[in-house]
Image: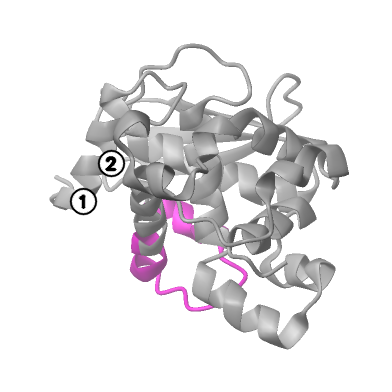
Amino acid sequence: MGAKIPRWEEALWSYLGHGDGNRCPLYEHCRVRKKCGWCISDHIADMAQLLEDGKLNGARHDFTGAEPKKLGRPFQLVERLAYKYLRKGKVHGPPTPIELISLLDAERAVEISTIPLKAHHGAIWCLKDRWIIQLRSRDPPAMRRHTLFHEAFHVLAHRSGSPVFRKMGIEVGYFNEWLADYFAICILMPREWVKEKWVEVKDVNRMAESFNVPKLAMWMRLRQLGLV
């Protein structure tokens, strides 16, 4: 029997279970959006495409702005979830080891398989006694790491047996998919590690190498934190 889920984590899955997968379930009532006038829900497709493109494009990244971004409650909870597993794995600095995947489900093992996927970067399958996370073999290693932890979020969301997501489709840009991306960003690039390393390095390429993540993912994290 797994450990009891804390209330804040129950709140995260509850929010997602009541959403439609397209937009933040708290969008209409979000105080952060009303105060700041900026919400990731309004830019999900752009952000997903930016990460997919793998390169900076002035026409595509104007929407991000240079100031730090304060994200709403679901994103705060996703970040807390990422830190929970970093603590469980006793990880204190980059790069985050892929062995954290073994902590996702106390009742099932997790296997990683690299195969020639065509339509997607990754996928998950739940068998009776284990999870299988599939990664696209032609992706660069750093991208596969990002995909691995993206899929890890889906494992956490589905491990109880009943998916918390009400998924409306499989197109790039859905809110739930971006939450999974944000989980990967947070567990691979915790904000305090990034801030501390940036003071020392001040170079996006070297930061990406240190954290073993795609350059665009690092740039997006630095941008979100207002460091570039």
Does the magenta-highlighted stretch encompass residue 85?
A: yes
Eyeballing the image, is 172 above or below 228? above
SS of the residue at dot 2?
helix
Q: Residue at x 27, y 36 (%)?
A: 13
- Residue type, label 2: Leu
Q: Residue at x 62, y 61 (%)?
A: 67
Q: Crowding at label 1, few (<14), some or many (≥20) Cα neighbours within 10 Å?
A: few
Give how far across and how far down residue 96 sits, in percent. Answer: 56, 66
Left-right relation of 115 to 39:
right
Reading the image, the residue beneath label 2 is 12
- Residue type, label 1: Trp
Q: Quadrant of the C terminus?
A: bottom right
Front residue (pair 161, 35): 35
| CB contact under 8 Å: marks 2 and 1 | yes
Reading the image, the residue beneath label 1 is 8
Magenta span of residues: 84-103
Eyeballing the image, is 60 above or below 77? above
Give how far across and how far down residue 8 sits, in percent. Answer: 21, 51
Eyeballing the image, is 227 above or below 162? below
One can see residue 25 in this view = no
Q: Residue at x 70, y 59 (%)?
A: 218
Q: Quadrant of the N terminus?
A: top left
Would you identify the image quadrant in which residue 83 lies? bottom left
One can see residue 108 in this view = yes
Q: Crowding at label 2, few (<14), some or many (≥20) Cα neighbours within 10 Å?
A: some
Q: Which residue is farthest top?
A: 169
Q: CA distance from mark 2 to mark 1?
A: 6 Å
Front residue (pair 116, 85): 85
